[in-house]
């Protein structure tokens, strides 16, 4: 499906094309039509799914051509960063229309925001606390409001905004269209939805489940970066993974992950660019014969090696490009097994996952491993660069003093002080 199948104003479709959006994301496909029909919507979707355009496009469509000077749409969101982001998205999507939006959040002066509210800017994107500050003055009465959006409702609940939201409700017209978006639906949000939505259409993308559904071949495990090794060890120990190739971003991380696993009782082989072809094949043979359950690899090392009969691929680090992801995951799919592809996603890697999801045209379900302590302190996989350099110097010095005199040191001796191969930051490493 392309955007042109959606009955959106041509000025909006132009902006969508300017942004390079080729086809609607699943949440956009599902949410835009009912919002255009004027229905209330309960959307279960995370930031990163394209939900901002999913509500902004139909709102802008609705307001386009109406008399200006009245604030007709209000978006409530938990943080000022998110408010600024939504306002920026709105600016981009409305660029071929006269419509305008403004962000209203705390930590900055009230004056400019007051001016916009008095002027009746078309769309207000606000954090609840600051909006209530404005409501103390008559100028902010949103009497002409037609659409209200609650964005990231579960996060607003987490940060204690629910009472503020209920107070805001008493300030806005009862006859309105309401859209509520939330990544999860805890009971408080369900109760809120029941109170403020009228006969809502429910739309969902990527249900957040606690276990991979049967037959699911892609699953993403959101996890802190420093807990990824522990999570992999746990999955293997529980028998959820029997034979796996785990891809890391750099050979340094591959080495450290393999060391971690071995130290924690999980046998692991490794292949990376520093290994000879014979060593790689040997490692792979070990995995296939079941000598160890985990083979840690970098992309480069794994290229050209035929990995069959693997039960799982773990993308320990999110690949930089969607192509790499498809390539890695292809290793189980090609063998026509019901191979699962797990993606370990740290919060910093979420944007890369969004790109992958767009490329593969579907949302990767989020999974949490029940009983795994996601809060625990963890061992760091990376040693800070300074410490690594120091260790390298010590090791080089030790090698030199142990080396027989006839082999000499000239090449490596001039190598180290320039910050040579081992001391250099592996590319892409942190
Ligand atoms: P959101 O979940 O709204 O924060 O969107 C996540 C990212 O996806 C943002 O950078 C959007 O600009 C981008 N995006 C939204 N819709 C699409 C689309 N249909 N095609 C490509 N990118 C999109």
Image (tube, helix red, strand yellow):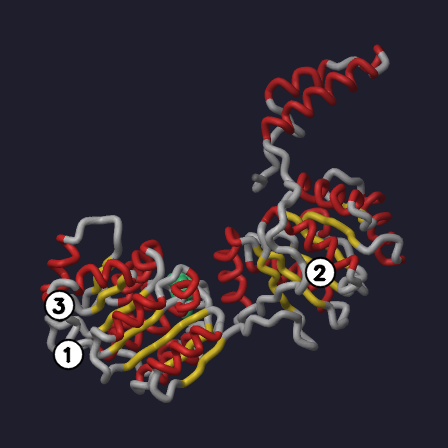
Q: Position of residue 390 (x, y in %)?
A: 65, 23
Is the C terminus in the top left, top right, bottom left or bottom right quadrant? top right
**Which residue lies at the image location 43% right of the left edge and 67% below the top edge?**
154
What secondary structure is marked by label 2?
Answer: strand
CA–CA distance between discs 3 and 2? 53 Å
CA–CA distance between discs 1 and 3? 13 Å
Q: Earlier in the sequence, mark 3 or mark 2?
A: 3
CA–CA distance between discs 1 and 2? 53 Å
Q: Position of 396 compared to 54: left or right? A: right
Q: Position of residue 314 (x, y in %)?
A: 69, 58
Residue topped by disc 1? 66
Q: Are marks 1 and 3 in contact (CB under 8 Å)?
A: no
Q: Earlier in the sequence, mark 1 or mark 3?
A: 1
**Please, is residue 391 above or below residue 187 in the view?**
above
Q: In which quadrant of this rendering is ligand 1 seen?
A: bottom left
**Which residue lies at the image location 27% right of the left edge and 72% below the top edge?**
12
**Which residue lies at the image location 80% right of the left edge and 60% below the top edge?**
243
Mark 2 vs ligand 1: CB below 8 Å:
no
What secondary structure is marked by label 1?
Answer: loop
Q: Position of residue 162 (x, y in %)?
A: 36, 67
Q: Earlier in the sequence, mark 1 or mark 2?
A: 1
Specify few, some or many for label 1: CA neighbours under 10 Å numbering under 14, 14-19, or 20 or more. few
Tag shown at residue 120: 3
Is the N terminus in the top left, top right, bottom left or bottom right quadrant? bottom left
Q: Position of 332 compared to 286: left or right? A: left
**Please, is residue 423 above or below residue 82 in the view?**
above
User: Closer to the camera, 275 or 400?
Assistant: 400
Residue topped by disc 2? 313
Q: Which of labels 1 and 3 is toward the front?
A: 3
Q: Which of labels 3 and 2 is toward the front?
A: 3
Residue 81 seen: yes
């Amino acid at each position: 499906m392309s955007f042109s199948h959606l009955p959106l104003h041509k000025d909006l479709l132009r902006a969508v094309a300017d942004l390079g959006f080729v086809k609607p994301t699943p949440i956009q496909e599902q949410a835009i039509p009912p919002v255009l029909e004027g229905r209330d919507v309960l959307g279960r979707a995370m930031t990163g799914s394209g939900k901002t355009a999913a509500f902004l496009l139909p709102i802008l469509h609705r307001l386009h051509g109406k008399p200006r000077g009245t604030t007709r749409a209000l978006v409530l969101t938990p943080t000022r960063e998110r408010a600024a982001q939504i306002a920026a998205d709105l600016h981009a999507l409305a660029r071929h229309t006269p419509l305008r939006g403004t962000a209203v959040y705390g930590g900055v002066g009230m004056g400019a925001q007051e001016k916009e509210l008095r002027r009746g800017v078309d769309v207000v994107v606000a954090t609840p606390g600051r909006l209530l500050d404005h409501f103390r003055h008559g100028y902010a009465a949103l009497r002409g409001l037609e659409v209200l959006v609650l964005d990231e409702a579960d996060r607003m609940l987490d940060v204690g905004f629910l009472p503020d939201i209920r107070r805001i409700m008493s300030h806005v017209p009862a006859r309105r269209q309401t859209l509520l978006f939330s990544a999860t639906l805890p009971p408080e949000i369900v109760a809120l939805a029941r109170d403020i939505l009228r006969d809502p259409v429910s739309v969902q993308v990527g249900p957040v489940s606690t276990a991979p559904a049967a037959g699911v071949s892609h699953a993403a495990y959101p996890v802190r970066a420093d807990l990824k090794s522990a999570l992999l060890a746990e999955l293997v120990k529980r028998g959820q993974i029997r034979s796996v190739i785990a891809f890391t971003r750099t050979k340094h991380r591959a080495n450290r992950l393999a060391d971690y696993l071995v130290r924690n009782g999980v046998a692991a082989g490794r292949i990376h660019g520093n290994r000879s072809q014979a060593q790689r094949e040997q490692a792979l043979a070990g995995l296939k014969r079941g000598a160890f359950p985990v083979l840690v690899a970098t992309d480069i090392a794994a290229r050209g090696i035929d990995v069959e009969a693997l039960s799982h691929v773990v993308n320990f680090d999110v690949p930089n490009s969607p192509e790499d992801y498809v390539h890695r995951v292809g290793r189980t799919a090609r063998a026509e097994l019901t191979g699962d592809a797990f993606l370990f996603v740290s919060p910093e890697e979420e944007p890369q996952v969004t790109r992958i999801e767009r490329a593969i045209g579907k949302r990767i379900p989020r999974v949490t491993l029940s009983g795994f302590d996601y809060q625990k302190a963890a061992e760091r996989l990376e040693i800070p660069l300074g410490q690594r350099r120091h260790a390298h110097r010590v090791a080089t010095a030790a090698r030199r003093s142990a080396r027989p005199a006839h082999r000499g040191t000239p090449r490596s001796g001039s190598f180290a002080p320039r910050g040579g191969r081992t001391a250099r930051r592996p590319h892409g490493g942190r």
